[in-house]
Image (cartoon, rainbow, N blue to C red):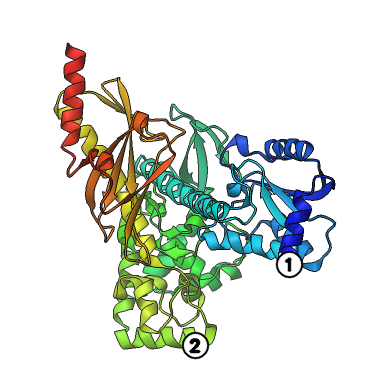
Amino acid sequence: MQNNEVTEELTEPSKRIRAAEYVRMSTEHQQYSTENQADRIREYARVQGIEIVRTYADDGKSGLNIGGRKSLQQLLRDVDAGATDFKLVLVYDVSRWGRFQDPDEAAYYEHLLKRKGVHVRYVAEQFDNDGSPVSTIVKGVKRAMAGEYSRELSVKVFAGQCRLIELGYRQGGPAGYGLRRVLLDQTGSVKAELARGEHKSLQTDRVILMPGPDVEVQNVLQIYRWFTEDGLSESEIAARLNDQGVRTDLGRNWTRATVHEVLTNEKYIGNNVFNRISFKLKMLRTVNEPDKWVRKEGAFEAIVPPETFYMAQGIIRGRTHRYSMEDLIEKLRNLYEHRGYLSGLIIDETEGMPSSSAYIQKFGSLIRAYQTVGFTPDRDYRYLEANQYLRRLHPQIVAQTEQAIGELGGTIERDPATDLLVVNKEFTVSLVLARCQTHDNGRNRWKVRFDTSLAPDITVAVRLNHANDAPMDYYLLPRLDFGQPRISLADRNAIEIESYRFDTLEYFYGMAQRTRLRRAS
């Protein structure tokens, strides 16, 4: 009854409605700046006769979850406490409310307001948020699209980061003790040393690692000597460093884990290693298996001789062999019962525990070790594995495409930042990987999002098989025939859709051949 009364009040033209506005900007597009959102919202309010009495703004905040979005949290608290003088919240569009990976989370926060008599209205959307069946369906689709955009963007960004790693450039994170981050311009010339917290300002600049101050380099070498020659443990080394007044790069005391990090990180022998730890889409921090790491050997100047580094790795692996499987499981079980939670950091910081790398060495991954003691992290890792496969597959498909067209005598240019292909300087091609998603009713769907910002002439949708571990087929989708931003494919599609399907990459040969012959004529 309360919600009906609120709806009637919101549609009553004779009353001047009091409203709050909520704006949010991450770092996606300037069009989504909080100022631009506020301008659109206030223009809408003026036309509708709405008075804006309160602003809640989250600047530079991701929409993947509510963590860190203090203004949205404050809005929810204010409404829940009844400390508001408005019955309406104006938001630019569904994505500004959030790009939650679970669409139900966005609905939940909106419901928290609705049950208190506060309605949410999306001013730039083409539907009225009035609770009707049509608006409910459209809003649900919009929420899913907002979340899917973040997932697909994550895949593309990660692929770009991997390419830069393989070129020898540093991607994020502090340099670490004994090393420093150095900024290079587009010609490879050194511009400046980056202090902690500083970032590059130009997109064409790149970052590499270089040896730090001599005193820190000597301390790193001393750590390796204590470990490989004197037989000291990580805890004993940490105690010596602290007694000598040496502090970490963060100005803190040394611990077992920080010493272990110096002894096991390949950056000290000049290797550029990426994806050792994942924290994608604001989900659970994940320690990845070594076969999922991305590396470039000899990318930087080494400060530790490789033979010394690998001797340390041999000692660490040798310690692992002193523990039987039963010993490792028993120690992990006791730690789990004591702490109630497990992570690589907890294992490495606990005195008397084998290192996290010891568990990875024995069990293949920390996740498998956790399973032996009944601990399951709050995360579906099957989705993570599918994402990792997509990231590996995408550059392979791009490379196969380049090779196929090149063998025919065609020309192809690839934009390293976007992977957009220009074929024979006549048309552009974008490659999109479509993951198979099985619904509760047993039906399979493949969501294909067109990259509207790049506006390619042709989008090649690569459908993965039902296990998401190999390509199944390919759809050649011309832009002129598909005006919408995305489509959904099923196991069986309409005849007009199936006419674009190919079983292999052979269609590239024909596509390039036709284009080449047309150019020759």
Residue 266 placement: quadrant: bottom left
- In the displayed structure, 164 sits above or below 139; it is above
Q: Nearer the viewer, mark 2 or mark 1?
A: 1
Name the residue nearer the viewer: 107 or 224. 107
Residue 348 numbered mark, or none:
none
Residue 246 visible in the snapshot: no
- The CA distance from mark 2 to mark 1 is 49 Å
Name the residue nearer the viewer: 502 or 442. 442
Residue 473 in the figure: left or right of residue 288: left
Mark 2 lies on a secondary structure that is: helix
Name the residue nearer the viewer: 487 or 182. 487
Mark 1 lies on a secondary structure that is: loop
Residue 365 placement: quadrant: bottom left
What amino acid type is highlighted by mark number 2? Glu
Residue 78 in the figure: left or right of residue 289: right
Residue 421 in the figure: left or right of residue 260: left
What amino acid type is highlighted by mark number 1? Met
Residue 337 numbered mark, or none:
2
Residue found at x 73% / y 52%: 89
The spot of residue 437 in percent (x, y) is 35, 59
Name the residue nearer the viewer: 80 or 321. 80
The spot of residue 8 in percent (x, y) is 75, 55
Q: Residues within 10 Å of mark 1 (few under 14, many from 20)?
A: few
Residue 1 numbered mark, or none:
1
Q: Residues within 10 Å of mark 2 (few under 14, many from 20)?
A: few
Quarter of the image for the C terminus: give it. top left
Residue 169 visible in the snapshot: yes
The spot of residue 193 in percent (x, y) is 56, 39
Check contact, mark 2 vs mark 1: CB within 8 A: no
The spot of residue 477 in percent (x, y) is 31, 36
Along the polypeptide, which appears first: circle 2 or circle 1?
A: 1
